[in-house]
Amino acid sequence: MAIDYQERIPNNVDLSEDRRLQRALEAWQPNYQKWWQEMGPTEFQTHEVYLRTAVSVDAKGWANFGYVKMPEYRWGIFLAEPEAERKVNFGEHKGEAAWQEVPGEYRGMLRRLIVTQGDTEPASVEQQRQLGFTAPSLYDLRNLFQVNVEEGRHLWAMVYLLHGYFGRDGREEADEMLQRHSGDPDKPRILGAFNEKTPDWLSFYMFTYFTDRDGKYQLASLAESGFDPLSRTCRFMLTEEAHHMFVGETGVGRVIQRACELMKEHGEDNVRKMGGIDLPTLQKYLNFHFSVSLDLFGSERSTNAANFYSMGLKGRFEETKIDDDHTLGDALYPILELEGEKFVTNQDNALTVINERLRDDYVTDCDRGVRRWNQIIKRQGINFELKLPHRAFNRQIGSFNLANTSGVRVSPEGEVITEAEWTQKHGGWLPTEADRAYVIGLMQPVTEPGKYAGWIAPPARGINNQPVDFEYVRLN
Ligand code: BYC
Ligand code: FE
Ligand code: FE
Protein backbone atom coordinates (compact mmCIF):
# COMPACT_ATOMS: atom_id res chain seq x y z
CA MET A 1 0.00 0.00 0.00
CA ALA A 2 1.44 3.32 -1.08
CA ILE A 3 1.62 5.88 1.67
CA ASP A 4 0.72 9.38 0.59
CA TYR A 5 4.12 10.90 0.97
CA GLN A 6 2.90 14.31 0.03
CA GLU A 7 1.29 14.10 3.41
CA ARG A 8 3.72 11.98 5.30
CA ILE A 9 6.94 13.64 4.20
CA PRO A 10 6.66 17.35 3.73
CA ASN A 11 8.89 18.19 0.81
CA ASN A 12 9.56 20.76 -1.82
CA VAL A 13 11.11 18.38 -4.34
CA ASP A 14 7.92 17.09 -6.02
CA LEU A 15 8.33 13.72 -4.40
CA SER A 16 4.91 12.57 -5.63
CA GLU A 17 6.09 13.07 -9.24
CA ASP A 18 8.81 10.47 -8.85
CA ARG A 19 7.24 7.15 -8.00
CA ARG A 20 10.49 5.21 -7.81
CA LEU A 21 12.06 7.63 -5.39
CA GLN A 22 8.86 7.76 -3.41
CA ARG A 23 8.85 3.97 -3.09
CA ALA A 24 12.51 3.90 -2.10
CA LEU A 25 11.91 6.42 0.67
CA GLU A 26 8.76 4.57 1.71
CA ALA A 27 10.86 1.50 2.22
CA TRP A 28 13.45 3.38 4.26
CA GLN A 29 11.05 5.36 6.43
CA PRO A 30 9.96 2.56 8.82
CA ASN A 31 13.62 1.72 9.39
CA TYR A 32 14.28 5.33 10.29
CA GLN A 33 11.30 5.34 12.70
CA LYS A 34 12.56 2.15 14.26
CA TRP A 35 16.04 3.64 14.62
CA TRP A 36 14.55 6.77 16.21
CA GLN A 37 12.65 4.67 18.75
CA GLU A 38 15.66 2.48 19.55
CA MET A 39 18.55 4.89 19.29
CA GLY A 40 16.89 8.32 19.66
CA PRO A 41 15.95 10.03 22.95
CA THR A 42 15.45 7.36 25.59
CA GLU A 43 12.46 9.10 27.18
CA PHE A 44 9.77 11.65 26.43
CA GLN A 45 8.76 10.07 23.13
CA THR A 46 5.12 10.35 24.12
CA HIS A 47 5.35 13.85 25.58
CA GLU A 48 4.43 17.05 23.81
CA VAL A 49 7.42 19.23 23.07
CA TYR A 50 7.26 22.83 21.89
CA LEU A 51 9.15 22.43 18.61
CA ARG A 52 9.65 24.41 15.48
CA THR A 53 9.05 22.56 12.24
CA ALA A 54 10.25 23.59 8.81
CA VAL A 55 7.15 23.89 6.67
CA SER A 56 8.74 25.85 3.84
CA VAL A 57 12.14 27.20 2.98
CA ASP A 58 11.38 30.89 3.19
CA ALA A 59 11.92 32.78 6.41
CA LYS A 60 8.23 32.73 7.37
CA GLY A 61 7.32 29.10 6.75
CA TRP A 62 10.26 28.14 8.82
CA ALA A 63 9.22 29.55 12.13
CA ASN A 64 6.29 27.23 12.70
CA PHE A 65 6.12 26.48 16.43
CA GLY A 66 3.80 24.13 18.24
CA TYR A 67 3.53 21.12 20.53
CA VAL A 68 4.63 17.91 18.82
CA LYS A 69 5.36 14.42 20.04
CA MET A 70 8.82 13.67 18.70
CA PRO A 71 7.94 10.50 16.76
CA GLU A 72 5.29 12.61 15.01
CA TYR A 73 7.74 15.34 14.03
CA ARG A 74 7.35 16.05 10.32
CA TRP A 75 10.74 15.02 9.04
CA GLY A 76 10.85 16.30 5.53
CA ILE A 77 12.97 17.08 2.52
CA PHE A 78 13.74 20.73 2.07
CA LEU A 79 16.03 22.23 -0.48
CA ALA A 80 16.76 25.94 -0.68
CA GLU A 81 15.29 27.63 -3.74
CA PRO A 82 17.29 26.98 -6.89
CA GLU A 83 19.54 29.78 -8.01
CA ALA A 84 18.88 30.65 -11.65
CA GLU A 85 21.75 29.91 -14.04
CA ARG A 86 23.91 28.59 -11.24
CA LYS A 87 27.41 27.59 -12.31
CA VAL A 88 30.18 25.39 -10.99
CA ASN A 89 32.14 28.14 -9.29
CA PHE A 90 35.55 26.55 -8.73
CA GLY A 91 37.89 23.78 -9.79
CA GLU A 92 38.46 22.27 -13.20
CA HIS A 93 34.84 22.72 -14.28
CA LYS A 94 34.59 26.34 -13.24
CA GLY A 95 32.12 28.18 -15.46
CA GLU A 96 30.13 25.11 -16.55
CA ALA A 97 26.45 24.91 -15.65
CA ALA A 98 25.95 23.44 -12.18
CA TRP A 99 25.15 19.70 -12.34
CA GLN A 100 21.59 18.56 -11.76
CA GLU A 101 22.69 14.92 -12.00
CA VAL A 102 25.74 13.20 -10.55
CA PRO A 103 28.71 13.53 -12.91
CA GLY A 104 29.52 9.90 -13.70
CA GLU A 105 33.26 10.06 -13.18
CA TYR A 106 32.87 11.61 -9.70
CA ARG A 107 30.14 9.34 -8.48
CA GLY A 108 32.26 7.48 -5.92
CA MET A 109 33.84 10.61 -4.47
CA LEU A 110 30.55 12.44 -4.22
CA ARG A 111 28.81 9.51 -2.58
CA ARG A 112 31.59 9.29 -0.06
CA LEU A 113 31.23 12.97 0.89
CA ILE A 114 27.47 12.62 1.27
CA VAL A 115 27.82 9.45 3.32
CA THR A 116 30.39 11.05 5.65
CA GLN A 117 28.16 14.07 6.13
CA GLY A 118 25.03 11.95 6.63
CA ASP A 119 26.71 9.63 9.14
CA THR A 120 27.37 12.42 11.62
CA GLU A 121 23.72 13.41 11.91
CA PRO A 122 22.22 10.26 13.49
CA ALA A 123 25.51 9.78 15.35
CA SER A 124 24.92 12.97 17.34
CA VAL A 125 21.37 11.88 18.21
CA GLU A 126 22.77 8.61 19.52
CA GLN A 127 25.41 10.42 21.54
CA GLN A 128 22.78 12.61 23.17
CA ARG A 129 20.13 10.01 23.77
CA GLN A 130 20.46 9.81 27.56
CA LEU A 131 20.53 13.54 28.25
CA GLY A 132 16.77 13.96 28.56
CA PHE A 133 16.89 12.27 31.98
CA THR A 134 19.00 15.01 33.50
CA ALA A 135 17.96 18.26 31.79
CA PRO A 136 18.60 21.36 33.92
CA SER A 137 15.22 22.81 32.88
CA LEU A 138 12.28 22.31 30.54
CA TYR A 139 13.73 25.05 28.35
CA ASP A 140 16.95 23.07 27.92
CA LEU A 141 15.07 19.80 27.48
CA ARG A 142 13.16 21.36 24.62
CA ASN A 143 16.33 22.69 23.01
CA LEU A 144 17.92 19.24 23.20
CA PHE A 145 14.95 17.71 21.43
CA GLN A 146 14.88 20.48 18.83
CA VAL A 147 18.49 19.75 18.01
CA ASN A 148 17.80 16.00 17.94
CA VAL A 149 14.83 16.13 15.56
CA GLU A 150 16.73 18.47 13.26
CA GLU A 151 19.76 16.20 13.17
CA GLY A 152 17.29 13.47 12.26
CA ARG A 153 16.08 15.68 9.44
CA HIS A 154 19.65 16.25 8.31
CA LEU A 155 19.94 12.50 7.91
CA TRP A 156 16.80 12.61 5.75
CA ALA A 157 18.46 15.33 3.68
CA MET A 158 21.47 13.13 2.86
CA VAL A 159 19.36 9.98 2.46
CA TYR A 160 17.22 11.82 -0.07
CA LEU A 161 20.36 12.54 -2.13
CA LEU A 162 21.54 8.93 -1.84
CA HIS A 163 18.17 7.51 -2.87
CA GLY A 164 17.45 10.14 -5.46
CA TYR A 165 20.78 10.22 -7.26
CA PHE A 166 22.79 7.07 -6.54
CA GLY A 167 20.51 4.12 -7.29
CA ARG A 168 21.14 0.80 -5.58
CA ASP A 169 24.43 1.62 -3.89
CA GLY A 170 22.86 4.84 -2.60
CA ARG A 171 20.06 2.81 -1.05
CA GLU A 172 22.58 0.48 0.55
CA GLU A 173 24.48 3.42 1.99
CA ALA A 174 21.20 4.82 3.35
CA ASP A 175 20.54 1.52 5.12
CA GLU A 176 24.00 1.49 6.61
CA MET A 177 23.42 4.94 8.10
CA LEU A 178 21.05 3.20 10.51
CA GLN A 179 23.37 0.25 11.14
CA ARG A 180 26.53 2.02 12.25
CA HIS A 181 26.18 3.42 15.76
CA SER A 182 28.11 5.91 17.81
CA GLY A 183 30.77 4.12 19.87
CA ASP A 184 29.82 0.68 18.53
CA PRO A 185 33.01 -1.40 18.64
CA ASP A 186 32.02 -3.39 15.53
CA LYS A 187 30.24 -0.74 13.47
CA PRO A 188 31.28 2.67 14.71
CA ARG A 189 30.38 5.99 13.15
CA ILE A 190 32.87 7.20 10.55
CA LEU A 191 34.49 10.21 12.22
CA GLY A 192 36.25 10.25 15.58
CA ALA A 193 34.29 12.91 17.46
CA PHE A 194 31.05 11.08 16.73
CA ASN A 195 32.14 8.04 18.66
CA GLU A 196 32.86 10.00 21.83
CA LYS A 197 30.34 10.09 24.65
CA THR A 198 28.14 13.08 25.48
CA PRO A 199 27.38 12.01 29.02
CA ASP A 200 26.42 15.31 30.61
CA TRP A 201 24.99 18.71 29.74
CA LEU A 202 28.28 20.57 29.87
CA SER A 203 29.54 18.17 27.20
CA PHE A 204 26.34 18.75 25.23
CA TYR A 205 26.80 22.53 25.21
CA MET A 206 30.47 22.17 24.26
CA PHE A 207 29.54 19.69 21.54
CA THR A 208 26.90 21.98 20.04
CA TYR A 209 29.31 24.90 20.22
CA PHE A 210 32.40 23.19 18.77
CA THR A 211 31.24 20.11 16.88
CA ASP A 212 28.05 21.52 15.37
CA ARG A 213 30.27 24.39 14.25
CA ASP A 214 32.34 21.90 12.27
CA GLY A 215 28.96 21.08 10.73
CA LYS A 216 28.54 24.72 9.81
CA TYR A 217 31.89 24.87 8.03
CA GLN A 218 31.55 21.52 6.27
CA LEU A 219 28.00 22.30 5.18
CA ALA A 220 29.05 25.73 3.97
CA SER A 221 31.78 24.11 1.84
CA LEU A 222 29.33 21.56 0.49
CA ALA A 223 26.83 24.35 -0.17
CA GLU A 224 29.37 25.62 -2.73
CA SER A 225 29.26 22.26 -4.55
CA GLY A 226 28.83 22.12 -8.30
CA PHE A 227 26.35 19.29 -7.67
CA ASP A 228 23.33 21.52 -7.27
CA PRO A 229 21.01 19.27 -5.20
CA LEU A 230 23.77 18.95 -2.58
CA SER A 231 24.31 22.68 -2.59
CA ARG A 232 20.61 23.40 -2.13
CA THR A 233 20.07 20.89 0.63
CA CYS A 234 23.12 22.15 2.55
CA ARG A 235 22.02 25.74 2.21
CA PHE A 236 18.78 24.91 3.98
CA MET A 237 20.52 22.77 6.62
CA LEU A 238 22.68 25.74 7.52
CA THR A 239 19.63 27.71 8.62
CA GLU A 240 18.87 24.95 11.14
CA GLU A 241 22.50 24.70 12.24
CA ALA A 242 22.47 28.25 13.57
CA HIS A 243 20.14 27.24 16.39
CA HIS A 244 22.36 24.31 17.40
CA MET A 245 25.35 26.58 17.82
CA PHE A 246 23.16 29.08 19.69
CA VAL A 247 22.25 26.33 22.17
CA GLY A 248 25.96 25.64 22.65
CA GLU A 249 27.13 29.21 23.00
CA THR A 250 24.35 30.30 25.34
CA GLY A 251 24.53 27.03 27.28
CA VAL A 252 28.23 27.42 28.04
CA GLY A 253 27.65 31.14 28.65
CA ARG A 254 24.99 30.37 31.26
CA VAL A 255 27.27 27.89 33.06
CA ILE A 256 29.96 30.59 33.15
CA GLN A 257 27.47 33.17 34.35
CA ARG A 258 26.38 30.92 37.19
CA ALA A 259 29.97 30.08 38.19
CA CYS A 260 30.78 33.80 38.38
CA GLU A 261 27.67 34.55 40.41
CA LEU A 262 28.58 31.82 42.89
CA MET A 263 32.15 33.11 43.14
CA LYS A 264 30.94 36.60 43.95
CA GLU A 265 28.21 35.51 46.31
CA HIS A 266 30.52 33.36 48.39
CA GLY A 267 33.73 35.30 47.92
CA GLU A 268 35.71 32.30 46.84
CA ASP A 269 36.85 30.57 43.68
CA ASN A 270 36.02 26.99 44.50
CA VAL A 271 32.47 26.97 43.23
CA ARG A 272 32.32 23.19 43.45
CA LYS A 273 31.60 23.69 47.14
CA MET A 274 28.47 25.57 46.10
CA GLY A 275 27.42 23.09 43.43
CA GLY A 276 28.68 25.05 40.46
CA ILE A 277 31.05 24.19 37.65
CA ASP A 278 34.34 26.00 38.17
CA LEU A 279 35.98 27.87 35.31
CA PRO A 280 39.13 25.70 35.24
CA THR A 281 36.92 22.64 34.71
CA LEU A 282 35.09 24.48 31.93
CA GLN A 283 38.45 25.18 30.32
CA LYS A 284 39.27 21.46 30.36
CA TYR A 285 36.00 20.57 28.64
CA LEU A 286 36.66 23.33 26.13
CA ASN A 287 40.15 21.91 25.44
CA PHE A 288 38.70 18.48 24.83
CA HIS A 289 35.87 19.47 22.53
CA PHE A 290 37.91 21.95 20.53
CA SER A 291 40.70 19.44 19.88
CA VAL A 292 38.45 16.56 18.84
CA SER A 293 36.51 18.94 16.60
CA LEU A 294 39.73 20.17 14.95
CA ASP A 295 40.34 16.56 13.93
CA LEU A 296 37.11 16.64 11.93
CA PHE A 297 38.77 18.79 9.29
CA GLY A 298 41.04 15.92 8.20
CA SER A 299 44.77 15.98 7.52
CA GLU A 300 46.52 19.23 6.74
CA ARG A 301 47.73 17.76 3.48
CA SER A 302 45.05 15.77 1.74
CA THR A 303 44.78 14.52 -1.81
CA ASN A 304 41.13 13.64 -1.12
CA ALA A 305 40.41 17.23 -0.29
CA ALA A 306 42.39 18.58 -3.24
CA ASN A 307 40.40 16.27 -5.50
CA PHE A 308 37.07 17.24 -3.95
CA TYR A 309 37.95 20.82 -4.80
CA SER A 310 39.36 20.31 -8.31
CA MET A 311 36.38 18.16 -9.22
CA GLY A 312 34.03 20.96 -8.14
CA LEU A 313 32.41 18.85 -5.41
CA LYS A 314 33.40 20.72 -2.22
CA GLY A 315 34.48 24.36 -2.17
CA ARG A 316 36.04 26.64 0.38
CA PHE A 317 34.09 28.57 3.00
CA GLU A 318 32.30 31.39 1.15
CA GLU A 319 34.02 30.37 -2.08
CA THR A 320 32.33 32.90 -4.29
CA LYS A 321 33.31 35.78 -2.02
CA ILE A 322 37.01 34.93 -2.27
CA ASP A 323 38.94 37.07 -4.71
CA ASP A 324 41.18 34.65 -6.63
CA ASP A 325 41.03 32.36 -9.66
CA HIS A 326 39.06 29.60 -7.87
CA THR A 327 41.21 26.89 -9.41
CA LEU A 328 44.25 27.30 -7.13
CA GLY A 329 46.70 26.10 -9.79
CA ASP A 330 49.84 27.72 -8.36
CA ALA A 331 48.43 29.36 -5.26
CA LEU A 332 50.16 28.88 -1.91
CA TYR A 333 48.72 28.71 1.57
CA PRO A 334 50.56 28.76 4.91
CA ILE A 335 50.48 25.77 7.21
CA LEU A 336 51.86 25.38 10.68
CA GLU A 337 54.09 22.38 11.21
CA LEU A 338 56.41 20.82 13.70
CA GLU A 339 59.97 20.46 12.56
CA GLY A 340 61.72 18.51 15.26
CA GLU A 341 60.57 20.39 18.34
CA LYS A 342 59.91 23.74 16.68
CA PHE A 343 56.77 25.12 15.08
CA VAL A 344 57.38 26.57 11.65
CA THR A 345 55.01 28.07 9.11
CA ASN A 346 55.52 26.57 5.67
CA GLN A 347 53.92 27.59 2.41
CA ASP A 348 52.40 24.76 0.47
CA ASN A 349 50.18 24.24 -2.53
CA ALA A 350 46.80 25.75 -1.64
CA LEU A 351 44.93 22.79 -3.09
CA THR A 352 46.86 20.24 -1.08
CA VAL A 353 46.29 22.08 2.19
CA ILE A 354 42.69 23.07 1.61
CA ASN A 355 41.52 21.25 4.77
CA GLU A 356 43.82 23.53 6.73
CA ARG A 357 42.26 26.63 5.27
CA LEU A 358 38.80 25.52 6.39
CA ARG A 359 40.21 24.67 9.81
CA ASP A 360 41.63 28.22 10.00
CA ASP A 361 38.22 29.71 9.21
CA TYR A 362 36.73 27.49 11.90
CA VAL A 363 39.30 28.45 14.54
CA THR A 364 38.65 32.15 13.93
CA ASP A 365 34.93 31.57 14.39
CA CYS A 366 35.42 29.50 17.56
CA ASP A 367 37.55 32.25 19.01
CA ARG A 368 34.84 34.87 18.59
CA GLY A 369 32.53 32.96 20.93
CA VAL A 370 35.31 32.44 23.48
CA ARG A 371 35.73 36.20 23.57
CA ARG A 372 32.04 36.66 24.21
CA TRP A 373 32.30 34.15 27.08
CA ASN A 374 35.20 36.14 28.48
CA GLN A 375 33.05 39.26 28.36
CA ILE A 376 30.56 37.52 30.67
CA ILE A 377 33.38 36.78 33.13
CA LYS A 378 34.71 40.31 32.89
CA ARG A 379 31.30 41.90 33.41
CA GLN A 380 31.06 39.94 36.65
CA GLY A 381 34.36 41.47 37.72
CA ILE A 382 36.15 38.12 37.82
CA ASN A 383 39.75 37.79 36.76
CA PHE A 384 39.84 34.70 34.54
CA GLU A 385 40.16 34.10 30.84
CA LEU A 386 39.11 31.10 28.80
CA LYS A 387 41.33 30.31 25.82
CA LEU A 388 41.32 28.05 22.83
CA PRO A 389 44.18 25.58 23.24
CA HIS A 390 46.95 25.47 20.66
CA ARG A 391 45.86 23.68 17.50
CA ALA A 392 48.48 20.97 17.94
CA PHE A 393 47.15 20.09 21.40
CA ASN A 394 45.62 16.62 21.84
CA ARG A 395 45.28 15.78 18.17
CA GLN A 396 44.50 12.35 16.69
CA ILE A 397 44.39 13.22 12.99
CA GLY A 398 46.96 14.93 10.79
CA SER A 399 50.55 15.96 11.28
CA PHE A 400 50.20 16.67 15.02
CA ASN A 401 48.86 13.19 15.64
CA LEU A 402 51.15 11.49 18.11
CA ALA A 403 52.02 8.79 15.59
CA ASN A 404 53.39 11.46 13.25
CA THR A 405 55.41 13.45 15.75
CA SER A 406 57.83 10.80 17.01
CA GLY A 407 56.45 11.01 20.47
CA VAL A 408 56.39 14.79 20.68
CA ARG A 409 53.41 16.25 22.52
CA VAL A 410 52.10 19.79 22.71
CA SER A 411 50.63 21.65 25.68
CA PRO A 412 47.56 23.91 25.40
CA GLU A 413 49.94 26.88 25.33
CA GLY A 414 51.80 25.35 22.40
CA GLU A 415 54.95 24.23 24.19
CA VAL A 416 56.50 21.09 22.84
CA ILE A 417 56.80 18.57 25.67
CA THR A 418 57.82 14.97 26.07
CA GLU A 419 55.52 12.02 26.39
CA ALA A 420 56.54 11.78 30.04
CA GLU A 421 55.55 15.40 30.74
CA TRP A 422 52.29 14.78 28.96
CA THR A 423 51.54 11.81 31.15
CA GLN A 424 52.23 13.89 34.19
CA LYS A 425 50.31 17.01 33.18
CA HIS A 426 47.41 16.12 30.92
CA GLY A 427 45.06 15.76 33.88
CA GLY A 428 45.34 19.51 34.32
CA TRP A 429 44.36 20.11 30.71
CA LEU A 430 41.67 17.59 29.89
CA PRO A 431 38.75 16.42 32.03
CA THR A 432 39.87 13.67 34.40
CA GLU A 433 37.67 10.84 35.57
CA ALA A 434 37.13 12.82 38.77
CA ASP A 435 36.11 15.96 36.85
CA ARG A 436 33.67 13.96 34.77
CA ALA A 437 32.28 12.25 37.84
CA TYR A 438 31.80 15.64 39.51
CA VAL A 439 29.98 17.11 36.51
CA ILE A 440 27.85 14.01 36.01
CA GLY A 441 27.01 14.10 39.71
CA LEU A 442 25.52 17.58 39.26
CA MET A 443 23.14 16.39 36.58
CA GLN A 444 19.85 16.14 38.43
CA PRO A 445 16.72 16.78 36.39
CA VAL A 446 14.74 19.98 36.95
CA THR A 447 11.28 19.65 35.48
CA GLU A 448 9.23 22.49 36.95
CA PRO A 449 8.55 25.30 34.44
CA GLY A 450 10.75 28.32 35.17
CA LYS A 451 13.12 26.42 37.50
CA TYR A 452 16.78 25.93 36.61
CA ALA A 453 19.47 23.67 38.05
CA GLY A 454 21.88 25.33 40.46
CA TRP A 455 24.90 25.03 38.17
CA ILE A 456 23.43 27.02 35.29
CA ALA A 457 21.87 30.48 34.97
CA PRO A 458 18.43 30.83 33.33
CA PRO A 459 18.52 31.98 29.70
CA ALA A 460 18.17 35.67 28.93
CA ARG A 461 14.97 34.98 27.02
CA GLY A 462 12.73 32.11 26.00
CA ILE A 463 12.12 30.44 22.65
CA ASN A 464 9.90 32.16 20.07
CA ASN A 465 9.19 35.06 22.45
CA GLN A 466 7.78 32.73 25.08
CA PRO A 467 8.70 33.45 28.70
CA VAL A 468 11.52 31.50 30.36
CA ASP A 469 8.96 29.79 32.62
CA PHE A 470 6.91 28.55 29.67
CA GLU A 471 5.97 24.87 29.69
CA TYR A 472 8.38 23.89 26.89
CA VAL A 473 7.73 20.21 27.46
CA ARG A 474 4.39 18.97 28.79
CA LEU A 475 5.26 16.27 31.23
CA ASN A 476 1.69 15.15 31.89
N1 BYC B 1 38.02 10.70 12.30
O1 BYC B 1 42.57 12.75 3.57
P1 BYC B 1 42.14 12.90 4.98
C1 BYC B 1 28.16 17.75 11.30
C2 BYC B 1 39.89 9.72 7.62
S1 BYC B 1 29.87 17.73 11.31
C3 BYC B 1 38.16 9.52 11.64
O2 BYC B 1 42.86 13.78 5.85
P2 BYC B 1 39.80 14.13 4.06
C4 BYC B 1 27.47 17.58 12.59
C5 BYC B 1 39.37 10.04 6.23
O3 BYC B 1 37.99 9.73 6.12
C6 BYC B 1 30.35 17.83 9.59
N2 BYC B 1 38.67 9.40 10.42
O4 BYC B 1 40.62 13.27 5.05
C7 BYC B 1 27.99 18.14 13.73
C8 BYC B 1 40.25 9.22 5.36
O5 BYC B 1 39.82 7.87 5.39
P3 BYC B 1 40.21 6.81 4.27
C9 BYC B 1 30.50 16.48 8.91
C10 BYC B 1 39.04 10.54 9.78
O6 BYC B 1 38.99 13.17 3.29
C11 BYC B 1 27.34 17.95 14.96
C12 BYC B 1 41.59 9.26 6.09
O7 BYC B 1 41.28 9.58 7.46
N3 BYC B 1 30.70 16.66 7.51
O8 BYC B 1 27.57 17.88 10.29
O9 BYC B 1 40.61 15.15 3.39
C13 BYC B 1 26.16 17.23 15.01
C14 BYC B 1 42.52 10.28 5.49
O10 BYC B 1 41.94 11.53 5.70
C15 BYC B 1 38.93 11.80 10.38
C16 BYC B 1 31.85 16.36 6.85
O11 BYC B 1 32.79 15.86 7.42
C17 BYC B 1 38.38 11.85 11.70
N4 BYC B 1 38.22 13.01 12.37
O12 BYC B 1 38.90 14.95 5.10
C18 BYC B 1 25.65 16.68 13.83
C19 BYC B 1 31.91 16.70 5.39
N5 BYC B 1 39.39 12.72 9.53
O13 BYC B 1 39.79 7.39 2.97
C20 BYC B 1 26.28 16.86 12.63
C21 BYC B 1 32.28 15.56 4.50
C22 BYC B 1 39.81 12.06 8.45
O14 BYC B 1 41.68 6.62 4.38
N6 BYC B 1 33.57 14.99 4.80
N7 BYC B 1 39.58 10.76 8.58
O15 BYC B 1 39.42 5.59 4.66
C23 BYC B 1 34.75 15.50 4.33
O16 BYC B 1 34.77 16.52 3.68
C24 BYC B 1 35.99 14.73 4.61
O17 BYC B 1 35.68 13.38 4.67
C25 BYC B 1 36.72 15.13 5.93
C26 BYC B 1 38.07 14.39 5.98
C27 BYC B 1 36.90 16.61 5.98
C28 BYC B 1 35.95 14.66 7.16
FE1 FE C 1 23.28 18.47 11.35
FE1 FE D 1 23.71 20.50 14.12
Image (cartoon, rainbow, N blue to C red):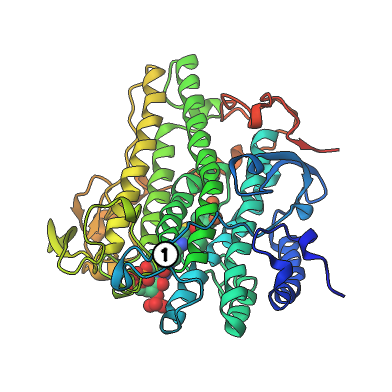
Circle 1 residue: 225
The answer to whether residue 137 of the structure is visible from this angle is: no
Camera-side residue of 185 and 207: 207
Image coordinates of residue 245 in percent, x first then y, are 50, 43
- For residue 164, above or below residue 213: below
What percent of the width, then of the height, locates residue 35? 71, 66
- Say which of 58 and 125 sits in front: 58
Image quadrant where one finds the N terminus: bottom right
Residue at point 73%, 63% (across, down): 38
Q: Position of residue 171 (x, y in %)?
A: 63, 79
Drawn side of residue 85 relative to residue 309, left or right:
right
Q: Residue at 15% across / 67% down in the picture?
A: 330
Label 1: how many Cα within 10 Å (few below 14, some 14–19, many 20+): many
Q: Which residue lies at the image location 71% right of the left edge and 78% below the top edge?
A: 20
Secondary structure state at the residue bearing disc 1: loop
With respect to residue 71, does 387 lie above or below? Answer: above
Q: On the image, which quarter does residue 375 sit in?
A: top left
